[in-house]
Image (cartoon, coloured by chain):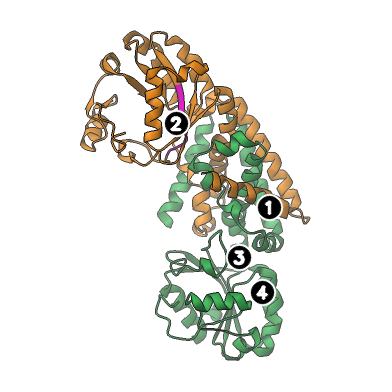
Chain colours: A green, B orange
């Protein structure tokens, strides 16, 4: 926001040590309790693990200004949209920036993190995007370099089960599979294994909530992946493996023209 | 080699158009037929698809100087080591640099490609590393920034089935699985899906040979991966998923301290 020219005040709500590091790094202007920050904030941005977002929404309802906007960056949206029904005193707009790193903490703050990324917004109804405070929020999403995509929460959760949650499971599973092979395998690898295991570095503290709040869609996605792998495995004995490379390679190339 | 200070002449064997581009880019000094190049070469470096390496080894035997060294960069080693028994007139030393890109062709040449990479050497017997020409070759591997690791071909093929061939199959399979989800999925993704599908861009022309020459080990590796994914899937209903994240994350972190 600072890099994009935001002139307002940014309050941070976190532990004393994180607040102190965040001020030092120029990420926030000051620290505050959730209650004090909510009393004065025009925009309340919840970037916590999903279960903490769900816990704090009813609390916020006691403190917020009626003209404020509360939004979040949670990686699943259906459960959060349900929980946000408890926030009746001001507007709520669900969000999910498709940007991130495997590292966490204020030291990993990166002003270019949102550049050229998709920012999903999940309004409850179309009118949610037309309020003045929502309009201003959407302008800042554009200012930080992201492209807004509007959809309902279940559509988001179904798509992300395949494009985000499945890649995480695939990477964690791959790392566990290779780990069982012992020392020769741990030494004999190239850049491909590093790419394929980058997501395995992700914190379970974040993922526990994602997996718990999108379980049925993720179960479907893993099942679909296992079925493709079984067909790929069977194809090794025939000449059909090339069809998988063609289809997968074509899709991978298409992702790169989109992004 | 040039960047590392190699003072000798580098002949390239390829199509007329590739030779012309390679000279233009300063990658080689001149083009030659395989026969003419073999008549004069001290080192013959085979960097073709595996089936072409296997085809050319008996031909080379008619042309090589007795004091020459033939080596290769094939991604599987057992089948090539067997084929190299037909090369009786000079020494053969199997090799596999664990470096590469998903792009191909002389335009992708990169003088830093081998920096900090493992270079596997698979001698038939220990004495193969003691000849003057092998000693000089090993010195150049070190000069281009790689670390030599010596092992037998079956050990190499078993380890690479897990650390290279399985990640390729996992990435191709993931891309095929997400591709089936249609437009919403193709639009809603972050950097994680790009990392996870980078290997899916690889050319089947290269991989067909790898898969065909290491089939039983790759079959085992895919089976092991599917089994881990099934256990991971089952764990979503319990609290055990964290153990997979811990094990996989620990292994992924360990790879990064090794490399």
Label 2 vs 1, first from the N-terminus: 2
Secondary element type, mark 3: loop
Does residue A151 sit above or below B31 in this rendering? below
Secondary element type, mark 2: helix
Q: Where is residue B146 in the image (x, y as percent from the top left)?
A: 43, 36
Q: Mark 4 points at which residue?
A: A53
Q: Quadrant of residue A218?
A: bottom right
Indicate the chain on which mark 1 is placed: B
Whether residue B99 appears in magenta in the rendering, the answer is yes
Mark 1 or 3, which is nearer the eye?
1
C-alpha span from label 1 to label 4 = 24 Å
Residue beneath the point at 70% across and 70% down: A51
Indicate the chain on which mark 3 is placed: A
Q: Name the residue under label 2.
A: B206
The quadrant in which the N terminus of chain B is found is: top left
Q: Position of residue A81 (x, y in %)?
A: 65, 73
Q: Position of residue A71 (x, y in %)?
A: 58, 77
């Amino acid at each position: 926001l600072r890099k994009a020219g935001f002139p307002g005040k940014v309050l941070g709500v976190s532990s004393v040590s994180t607040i102190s590091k965040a001020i030092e790094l120029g990420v926030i202007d000051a620290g505050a309790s959730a209650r004090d920050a909510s009393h004065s904030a025009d925009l309340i941005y919840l970037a916590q693990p999903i279960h903490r977002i769900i816990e704090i929404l009813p609390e916020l309802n006691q403190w917020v200004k009626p003209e404020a906007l509360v939004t979040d960056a949670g990686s699943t949206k259906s459960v959060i949209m349900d929980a946000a029904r408890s926030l009746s005193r001001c507007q709520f707009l669900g969000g999910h920036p498709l940007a991130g790193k495997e590292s966490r903490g204020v030291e990993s703050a990166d002003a270019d993190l949102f550049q050229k990324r998709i920012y999903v917004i999940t309004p409850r109804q179309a009118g949610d995007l037309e309020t003045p405070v929502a309009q201003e929020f959407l302008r800042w999403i554009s200012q930080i370099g992201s492209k807004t995509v509007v959809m309902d929460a279940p559509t988001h959760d179904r798509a992300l089960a395949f494009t985000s949650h499945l890649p995480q499971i695939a990477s964690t599973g791959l790392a566990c599979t290779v780990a069982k092979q012992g020392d020769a395998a741990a030494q004999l690898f190239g850049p491909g294994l590093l790419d394929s295991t980058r997501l395995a570095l992700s914190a379970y503290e974040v993922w526990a909530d994602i997996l718990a709040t999108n379980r049925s869609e993720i179960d479907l996605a893993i099942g679909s992946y296992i079925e493709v792998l079984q067909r790929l495995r069977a194809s090794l004995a025939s000449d059909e493996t090339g069809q998988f490379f063609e289809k997968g390679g074509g899709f991978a190339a298409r992702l790169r023209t989109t992004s």
